[in-house]
Image (cartoon, rainbow, N blue to C red):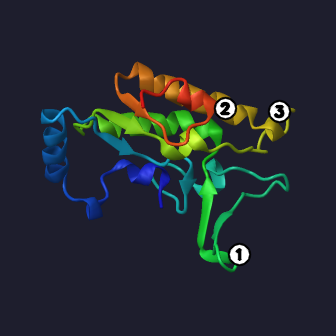
Amino acid sequence: GEVGGGFKLNSKLGSSSDLKKLTEYCKDNGIASYMDYDLVNFSKNGGGFSKSNDAVINVGELTAVQYDYDVASKNKLEDSAHYLLSPKAFTEAWKKLLHATEKLSVDGISLSSLSNTSYSDYADKTKADYYSKSGMTEAAQDVFKMVASSGKKLLSTDANLYAALISDS
């Protein structure tokens, strides 16, 4: 529920030693290993990010709340409420992510949600381009460049052009 999954290994996936064994197996067999982090969606405050300060603002100047929908009935799933991280917070999220991954032995980082998502943030009314998603593109590109300069490989899923061009996979 937190930005980047709280930047820690989900205990349901195993322990740190389990991850180390997996990455060693991957390395021994020539398999690249990546850890995926969601830097876009979050449902609760934590890790230095909050709904009131770091979530995207909609055109009505309210915090934008997102929902999943039932595919068959097209009804909104009320318990799926989540928020989108403001592009202005991406750099801070990346710094936390880099610090968290220093301890992991994975080859690279996957930012699947950031690589295939684009949205507008209406928080800054002084810029005319807030409705064209251009702030999102530049902020995401900056994160991808920081990943590349960190020495970690970058994996993107269903990538937008700005992510596809800089991704290793």
Mark nearer the N terminus (2 vs 1): 1
Q: Residue at x 24, y 38 (%)?
A: 103
How crowded pointer 1 is (Cα within 10 Å; few <14, some 14-19, many 20+) is rated as few
Q: Residue at x 28, y 32 (%)?
A: 107
Left/right of residue 135 with respect to residue 160 in the rendered view: right
- On screen, residue 58 versus residue 115, left or right, reads right
Q: Are marks 2 and 3 in contact (CB under 8 Å)?
A: no
Above or below, 154 relative to 77: above
Q: Any mark on residue 115, and which?
A: none
Q: Earlier in the sequence, mark 2 or mark 3?
A: 3
- Mark pair 2, 3: CA separation: 11 Å
For label 3, the crowd category at 10 Å Cα-Cα, with few meaning under 14, some 14 to 19 and many 20 or more, is some
Badge 1 amino acid: Lys
Q: Which residue is mark 1?
A: 74
Label 3 belongs to which residue? 129
Q: Quadrant of residue 119?
A: top right
Front label number (1 vs 3): 1
Tell me residue 132's x, y (percent): 81, 37
Q: Are marks 2 and 1 in contact (CB under 8 Å)?
A: no
Callout 3 amino acid: Asp
Task: In the rendered view, tell whether residue 38 sits above or below residue 165.
Answer: below
> Which class describes the residues within 10 Å of circle 2: few (<14), some (14-19), or many (20+)?
many
- x and y percent of residue 125 in the render? 84, 39
Q: Nearer the viewer, mark 2 or mark 1?
A: 1
Please provide percent x and percent y for residue 165: 55, 24
Q: SS class of the residue under badge 2?
A: helix
Q: Residue at x 47, y 56 (%)?
A: 2
- Using the numbered discs, state the Cα–Cα distance from disc 1 to disc 3 in whole angstroms: 32 Å
The amino acid pointed to by label 2 is: Thr
Mark seen at residue 137 = 2
Quarter occupied by the C terminus: top left
Q: Position of residue 131 (x, y in %)?
A: 82, 40
